Amino acid sequence: MESNVREPREFKFEFSLSVLDQLGRKLYRNFITILGEAVSNSWDADARNVWIELDRDRRQLRIRDDGIGMTESDMQDKFLKIGYTKRRGGATRTASNRPFIGAKGIGKLALLSCADRVQIISKMKGNDSVGCEIDNLIIDEAMSNDLSTDQLSLNLPSPAGITALDAYASGTFLIFDQLRVSNSTDEYLRKALALYFRFSFIDPTFTIHYNGIPISEKDLKSLADSTEFVWQIGTEEDQDSFLQTIDSKFSTKLSGVFPNGVHGFIASTKAPKDLLIFGSGNRVGIDLFVNGRLRERNFVEDRFSARIASQYLYGQIHFDAIDTDTTEDLFTTSREGVIRDNPEVEALINSLRKASVQIFDNWDEWRLKLRESGDEENKRLSRTQRATRTIVDEQAKSLFQDDYEKILKHLNVAQKEGLESNLANYSIIYTLENLLRSLIDEFDVHLDNKFQNIANGWRQSSDRLQVEAGVPVNCRLNDSDLYYLQLKDLIEIASSISQSLPISLDNRINSLKYLRNIIMHCAQLTEYGSNLLRDQSEAASAEVRLLVNDLYHSA
């Protein structure tokens, strides 16, 4: 008798082609990231060279390396197997001992996002070339029919593609037709490759070529030339070769404790605009690198203080220890960031945050030494001192123009002799005197004989000087009697305006007169004199405020 019991169905995973769309074309949006996947594959293939050629007229991108290449089985079972990783069994390094860059086995899907068709041709030494063509238009049609990955066969490369590697011993060749990229200039791409792929930092025998010319630190000359200060992290042996192209005004090593293996640098430019080396508002930041590859741009952008110095900073932090055979995968699926909630990553962030205290303090100190604007929040100088320094510098630039740099050292000497201090002190006298003149004039106070005689005496002296100088017209903008009186006189007059609130007339008036005469003769006050001027002026200004309030209240 036959059994009516049905055999249980065997279930298995089946992946829709839309997975390729989500993990490839929609996940990788940055063309530099796409280039990075191709360059990383070349690195992992032990290539010594990778050649990138962009033909804008034909909308074609060609990337070829001289790595070990792939056999037919490698192409199918490794490259085309989504999720295949070279790190199986704990492998972390290539045959030539390079650290593997690839990890998740899905970065290759980035190649789907930037062209209509991608040809992959590869050749291992002693073998024939193998290859296939990925046609995004065919994938689109298959997705519309809800096909799965095992229902789609890939085309063979073009005849020219099949023979593309015949002249070479080994390597892999990628050909992107009908490229879909933004109109990035060659200069932009060269700078991005030089800045974001530091494989040569690990292995100087690895070279990236763009349109026939090797990528090097020379491509970052504009950034190097605009760099003022450098803070190094790690030992001299870890020094980035880019730093050798920088002639910094000041440099030092960052103090503090960083996680083991962290090295790199933070630098600052002369102006924030100098970080816009890519144009279009795309600025250089402080970036995180792992094993020579950019892993997160602007790694500390939301962690550094909002202090003004942060607008001038860029750098490269190398932390290879977070990608070893004993560490978990800390990179996001798009490979454009690191996962935050990890003790090692958090330790690095905390170290950089603590280091920012030194960076901001050094930056302000060094900028002031170069007579440039610093950090107003730093207590090294008061806001008044910073403002007067700016005024002095701008006046010097206006006076000496192209010779300003030559004059700068003498200006520094003048600063030590009190140039900026006297300007600040003069502004106190100027403010007090003219405030009192305005107040006296507004309330139409009549000058008695004493002050009229003082004003006439100074007027006659000024007239004699005008005649002796041969100046045909009076150069005083304000020629009223009040402008021939000095601070002592003006305080006495102001005190007579309100009988209910007279300004105290003690030794303060005479000390202010004494200090004023020193300043008006462009001489320098001692530290005691400067402190005395501020004390007496603050007391006088407080009484003037009371007087003003009293007068306006009574009016």
Image (cartoon, helix red, strand yellow):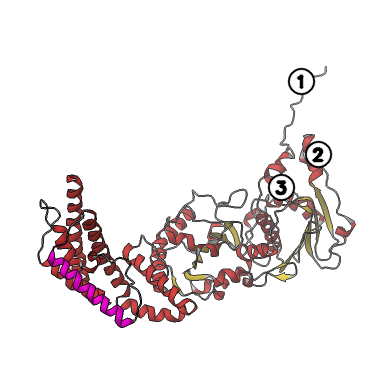
Q: How many marks do you count on the picture?
A: 3
For label 1, count other residues whose C-alpha is less than 10 Å away and answer few (under 14), some (14-19) or many (20+): few
Quadrant position of residue 367:
bottom left
The structure residue drawn at horizontal position 20% and vertical position 66%, both measured from the top left corner, is 487
Q: Quick one: quadrant of the N terminus?
A: top right
The structure residue drawn at horizontal position 38% and vertical position 68%, both measured from the top left corner, is 391
Q: Residue furthest right?
A: 159
Residue under circle 1?
A: 5
The CA distance from mark 2 to mark 3 is 20 Å
Mark positioned earlier in the residue sequence (1 or 2)? 1
Q: Is residue 525 visible to us here?
A: no
Give the left or right position of residue 409, taking residue 523 as reference: right
Residue under circle 3?
A: 82
The CA distance from mark 1 to mark 2 is 41 Å
Q: What residue type is labelled 2?
A: Glu
Give the left or right position of residue 106, taking residue 484 as reference: right
Residue 256 % position (x, y): 40, 65
Decide whether the magenta segment is chiefly helix, strand or loop: helix
Q: Is residue 545 visible to us here?
A: yes
Mark positioned earlier in the residue sequence (2 or 3)? 3
For label 3, count other residues whose C-alpha is less than 10 Å away and answer few (under 14), some (14-19) or many (20+): some
Q: Which amino acid does label 1 sit on?
A: Val
Give the left or right position of residue 214, taking residue 455 as reference: right
The structure residue drawn at horizontal position 25% and vertical position 58%, both measured from the top left corner, is 438
Question: Up-down: is 462 above or below 323?
Answer: below
Quadrant position of residue 276:
bottom right
Q: What residue type is labelled 3?
A: Ile
**Residue 171 versus residue 248: which sits nearer the camera?**
248
**Residue 436 versus residue 24: which sits nearer the camera?**
436
Residue under circle 2?
A: 141
**Highlighted range, magenta:** 447-469
Residue 224 % position (x, y): 56, 71
